[in-house]
Image (tube, coloured by chain):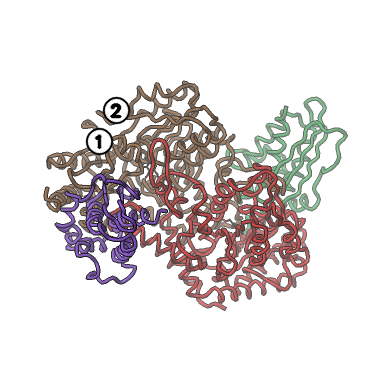
Chain colours: A green, B red, C brown, D purple
């Protein structure tokens, strides 16, 4: 097995996969969106509870691979408490970070995200890591 | 066991250590097939059917010789029963869009099985939706993982227009009793559409033994080039069906007001076809029959059985198969607590090529209460070493996931 | 004139003395293109899109790289505007069967030109017949043998849904002013469908200069493999169009009740595609642009002009072309008192490959009061010797027929 | 040019091509049929005048290549005066002779037909030679 692979399946990822955070009932749901990845059959359901423009709670429930599940779980920790606008720019940055479309200094991102960096060496799996983020984006762009 | 065929496959020679266990998705090509295509392009290439010079006559002759060879391979009455398409998917869409479109009315029924590949499922589902017909989906026995023949028998009624059935499931390998399927369909005057994509690479096929109305296959799953498929149709259907696509090479006469069409199979082959694809399948069939499909079957079944045994012994692997039968060298499984896609990534990293996902058979995967599965598929060029590699890969997966 | 390109084409090296003057039907392939395909099969072959192992990832990357390359070649906004098909014929049928089917109503009009190849004529004629719409056929000027733009302008009305026009006639070589065609169509909200099959092998194409709604081409007419074609479509159309064929690789989710589809272009690429075909066209475009389409045009035009001059000088040859322009190296003619098919047979016997017949353009041939024509078509690999051979062949024909 | 080609374009063929026989109006037309060969755009129109089961007159008008035109012209000379049944078996024999499907002793055929034998070396042109014969067959099989 290559070190690249080791890098992708780090303990933090596996921990988030085995124990995904924040899949729970919200007091009230302001936005919700479902995402599919036909490639592996990943499915993610995201719900936001807002107070004005601030995200007060989030639920992320994933049925999917380790990468997608961990990515969703990590995301759920990160987004809580951010404003909608902060969330949007965070999603932008994470997308750029994972796809390499734009140079992002990892230091500018929450450290937990760095655990996902290994996926960049597996182009076909990037979609798995992206799915929760793009689904969150869709939810936030809804009128 | 087959010895030495690996040497016939350049990809395997060029990737020592590769365990290619994804032949059910598409097979590698032996050098005779590649050489046949390359020779065509280097010595005989020209467009077919309308050239009166020797290159074009040779190209036409090669194209039609392929039709004869494939007809002989499946025991079709005449080469004219064979329409050349891109793949199984197009073959089935052609049937649904022509005779399907003209025969199915509101209130009619179309019977498919839960085991179908999307290629033999979605076209019928969409036709039924469009026409206000009912799509009846026949299940499998959860114990044996074989088509539920009793359910099929009661699903077919005098409202049934088409019975669409795979000859070999690309997930389970199961091979329904097509003679019985045909008998049931015929009792009610329904037409049969068989998906032979996963069957013909592994079994001799004699269609005179069950007389399907239509049957589809893909060259790329049986050592031929990608982009070339075949539709077999009974003459009376092909003669009465409207064309699928229109344009060059399929017309008899075009005036501003109207167009008359050529006879089948030309009627269904609009535009310049993939001539080298036909040549590749001709050569692939020669190669396969030369080795012998029976010997291939024996070889791949032995390897799949061995893998099955070893994976079972690991305790953490769930195999989805009837314990008594392994078909078409196909082995579907899952590793406990690990998503199949992660398994496949770890295997892929070790140069073990398997497929993970829904295998274009979502209704079946769903019926079996899974989201995805891993599929290892063995073919003539696989070896016991490939089995060892697969087992080592699963071992590694379990280690990574601390299982 | 281009020197030495003949050496790049194995067929020509393997048939010394051959005068291949049928490139408008299909071109020969340079060894770089054949090597690219062969290398793919020997080193990187696998099915695309769903494999997570390296072979499949490489195959997918090559397939998508071809899409990017072709997009760049025609200046499409995005690779996602390109759908891969079997050929121009399928590309056009796809449009007619999806957006054509959903947009055209009884009483509507479809405008085509008399110069269309059957591929861009019959699908529209049949759609019009099916829908009770009117097919309006715009003629050519009998003097200049160019599209009659005044007639086109008056044919397009607010009932016109589609304007379907070749970018280069495969019989006459004429190249309509597509910017003007588009302008006229757009004025009335009609969509344009351009057949670029004979145009792209010879001219740089920048679609941003006229913004077609749809445009079709075939790889095999521009040094790529047979069996591979392209449909360009504007994003908004591709997004809203229903799929053409259904099955694997084009779905998002399939349940027993319903199916949702992938985004374009995948939505239109059901089943295993001709991956090596995409690779071949990628390589062919590199080769063509490396030589330069301008230089190719100059070369073939010079040869066609020379042939034109010599044939005219024989007195018994009637050439169908605007005296001022030769396009795409195409030379249509007839020999007085000899049926074109007999001419082609005599030439063929002398290894001079020309095409005789209606060239899949019966409406045009009829409009010109002919039954058939001979077409010699020149391309980058032809030489002055080929011209000499053609002239000698016609000389011989006249002798055989005592003319 | 090969001798095979010379063989196909014999003077007899060229003569029939330049001066096709029996394209004329009939007193009355009992059967008629049109044939097309999409390959070269050949078109043949055949009319029979019958007295009971005997063909009393025939008109064959061809717009086509030398081979098709000559074949039709030669046929028109041969069929006149034959019975319908004789015609059918003649057509059978000519088809077998041209395609080589069955061994036919050329001596069993009218000698003018032997001029057409050259076409057998040009498989793609056999259709041209066959067209008048298959069209005649269609006409005779009509109810
Ligand atoms: C102008 C034109 N359109 C369409 C076609 C059809 O191309 P294809 O047979 O590759 O579909 C041709 C080629 O014969 C052509 O010349
Ligand atoms: C059973 C079955 N049917 C149909 C198909 C579709 O084949 P193709 O992609 O060649 O159209 C496949 C291959 O994936 C298959 O396994």
Q: Which residue is mark 1?
A: C326
Towards the viewer: B217 or A142: B217
Give percent across and percent down for residue A82.
77, 32
Q: For the residues labelled 2 and 1, say whether their Cβ atoms are less than 8 Å apart.
A: no
Which quadrant: the N terminus of chain D? bottom left
Q: Position of residue B215 (x, y in %)?
A: 56, 59
The local crowd at label 1, few if under 14, some if 14 to 19, many if 20 or more residues have their Cα within 10 Å, is some
Q: Is residue B50 left or right of residue D78?
A: right
Query: Given this view, does label 2 or label 1 mark the residue nearer the observer?
Result: 2
Query: Earlier along the polypeptide chain: callout 2 or callout 1?
Result: 2
- Give neighbour class at mark 2: few <14, some 14-19, many 20+ (Cα, 10 Å): few
Residue C141 is tagged as 2
Name the residue located 67 percent from the left edge and 74 percent from the top edge: B305
Answer whether residue B351 is visible to the viewer in this image: no
Badge 1: chain ID: C
Q: Are marks 2 and 1 on the same chain?
A: yes
Q: Is residue C212 visible?
A: yes
State which quadrant residue C18 falls in: bottom left
The image shows residue B212 at horizontal and vertical percentages of: 58, 62
Q: Is residue D74 left or right of residue B337?
A: left
| Chain of the residue that carries numbered disc 2 in the rendered image | C
Vertical placement of residue B157 versus C364, above or below: below
- Mark 1 element type: loop
User: How many angstroms separate mark 2 from mark 1 (CA)?
Assistant: 16 Å
Give the answer, above or below, for where B162 lies relative to B294: above
The one of D57 and B232 positioned closer to us in this rendering: D57
């Amino acid at each position: 097995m290559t070190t690249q692979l080791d890098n992708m399946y780090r303990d933090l990822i596996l921990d988030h996969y085995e124990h995904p955070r924040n899949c729970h009932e919200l007091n009230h749901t302001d936005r919700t969106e479902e995402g599919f990845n036909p490639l592996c059959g990943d499915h993610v359901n995201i719900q936001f509870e807002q107070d004005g423009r601030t995200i007060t709670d989030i639920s992320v429930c994933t049925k999917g691979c380790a990468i997608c599940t961990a990515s969703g779980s990590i995301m759920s920790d990160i987004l809580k408490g951010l404003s909608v606008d902060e969330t949007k720019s965070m999603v932008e940055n994470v997308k750029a970070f994972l796809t390499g479309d734009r140079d992002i200094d990892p230091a500018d991102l929450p450290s937990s995200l760095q655990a996902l960096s290994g996926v960049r060496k597996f182009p076909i799996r990037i979609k798995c890591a992206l799915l929760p983020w793009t689904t969150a984006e869709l939810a936030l762009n809804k009128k | 066991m087959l010895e030495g065929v690996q040497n016939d496959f350049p990809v395997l020679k060029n990737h020592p250590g590769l365990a290619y266990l994804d032949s059910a998705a598409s097979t590698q090509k032996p050098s005779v097939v590649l050489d046949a295509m390359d020779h065509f392009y280097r010595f005989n290439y020209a467009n077919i059917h309308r050239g009166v010079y020797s290159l074009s006559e040779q190209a036409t002759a090669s194209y039609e010789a392929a039709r004869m060879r494939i007809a002989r391979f499946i025991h079709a009455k005449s080469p004219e029963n064979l329409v050349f398409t891109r793949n199984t998917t197009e073959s089935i869409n052609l049937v649904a869009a022509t005779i399907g479109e003209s025969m199915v009315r509101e209130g009619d029924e179309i019977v498919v099985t839960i085991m179908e590949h999307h290629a033999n499922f979605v076209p019928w589902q969409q036709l039924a939706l469009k026409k206000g017909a009912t799509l009846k989906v026949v299940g499998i026995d959860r114990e044996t993982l074989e088509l539920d023949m009793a359910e099929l028998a009661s699903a077919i009624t005098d409202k049934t227009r088409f019975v669409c059935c795979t000859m070999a499931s690309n997930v389970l390998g199961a091979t329904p009793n097509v003679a019985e399927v045909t008998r049931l369909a015929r009792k009610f005057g329904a037409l049969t559409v068989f998906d032979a994509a996963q069957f013909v690479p592994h079994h001799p096929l004699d269609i005179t033994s069950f007389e399907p109305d239509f049957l589809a296959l893909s060259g790329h799953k049986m050592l031929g080039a990608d982009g070339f498929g075949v539709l077999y149709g009974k003459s009376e259907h092909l003669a009465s069906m409207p064309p699928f696509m229109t344009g060059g090479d399929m017309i008899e006469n075009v005036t501003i007001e109207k167009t008359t069409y050529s006879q089948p199979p030309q009627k269904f082959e609009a535009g310049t076809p993939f001539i080298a694809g036909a040549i590749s399948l001709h050569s692939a069939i020669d190669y396969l029959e030369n080795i012998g499909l029976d010997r291939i079957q024996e070889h791949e079944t032995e390897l799949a059985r061995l893998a099955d045994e070893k994976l079972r012994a690991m305790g953490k692997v769930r195999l989805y198969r009837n314990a008594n039968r392994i078909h078409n060298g196909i082995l579907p499984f899952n590793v406990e607590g690990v998503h199949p896609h992660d398994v496949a990534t770890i295997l892929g990293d070790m140069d073990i090529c398997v497929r993970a996902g829904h295998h274009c058979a979502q209704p079946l995967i769903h019926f079996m209460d899974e989201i995805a599965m891993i599929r290892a598929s063995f073919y003539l060029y696989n070896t016991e070493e490939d089995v060892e590699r697969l087992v080592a890969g699963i071992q590694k997966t379990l280690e990574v996931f601390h299982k």
